Amino acid sequence: MTPDRFRAIVDAYGADARHWPAGERAAALAWADAHQDEAHALLSASAQLDAWLATDAPPQPDAALTRRIIASAPAWAPAPRGLVSRGVAARSPRARVWWSGAALIGAGLAGVLAGAFVVSFALLAGGPPHGTTPATASDAPSLATSFDGTTADWSGE
């Protein structure tokens, strides 16, 4: 254990040896016993900081704020008999309709986005050269569908 490592341990974990890393605790305590003056100076400064940090407490909400939060919580509909015994609460019918409508809209938006992606990919990947207009679908691979058959022979690959 070096003086710098002992200082780093005390700075990081505080003056209480129970908080020090278990793998280095014995070596740090042995170093502190061998160098009592240096260790005492470091540990006393760290103990003051530990005591100051221990006095800090988060502010507690007052009772009026707690009552307002509880009063603003959504009300739940009574659960069906079988669900009450298992601790499951049912939502009101209005909440179920809202969520099902949101799910339907989300599915529709996902379909629109997927379609836009496919169209943009098709246009970027294989459109006809700039300035040319194919006469038929067989002249332009980008206008062909999967039902048209292919002009390329991939059997050799």
Image (cartoon, helix red, strand yellow):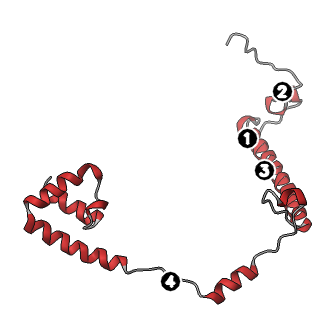
Instruction: Estimate how packed mark 3 is, as few (under 14), some (14 to 19) or many (20 or more) residues with alpha carbons within 10 Å.
Output: few
Check whether the beta carbons of the residues at disc 1 and disc 4 lie within 8 A of each other. Answer: no
Q: What residue is at 73 percent from the left and 36 percent from the top? A: 129
Q: Which residue is mark 4?
A: 59
**Which residue type does callout 3 highlight?**
Leu
Q: Is residue 95 above or below residue 30?
A: below
Q: Earlier in the sequence, mark 1 or mark 2?
A: 1
Q: Secondary structure at mark 3?
A: helix
In 3D space, how far apart are the residues under numbered discs 3 and 4 (Cα atoms)? 47 Å
| CA neighbours of label 1 inside 10 A, class few (<14), some (14 to 19), many (20+) | few
Q: Nearer the viewer, mark 1 or mark 4?
A: 4
Nearest to N terminus: mark 3 or mark 1: 3
Amino acid at pointer 2:
Asp
**Which residue position holds label 2?**
139
- Measured in 3D between alpha carbons, the distance from the residue under mark 3 to the one under mark 2, in whole angstroms, is 29 Å
Q: Nearer the viewer, residue 70 or 112?
A: 70
The residue beneath circle 1 is: 121
Question: Residue at position x 76%, y 18% from top?
Answer: 152
Which label number is shown at residue 113? 3
Q: Position of residue 100 (x, y in %)?
A: 88, 58
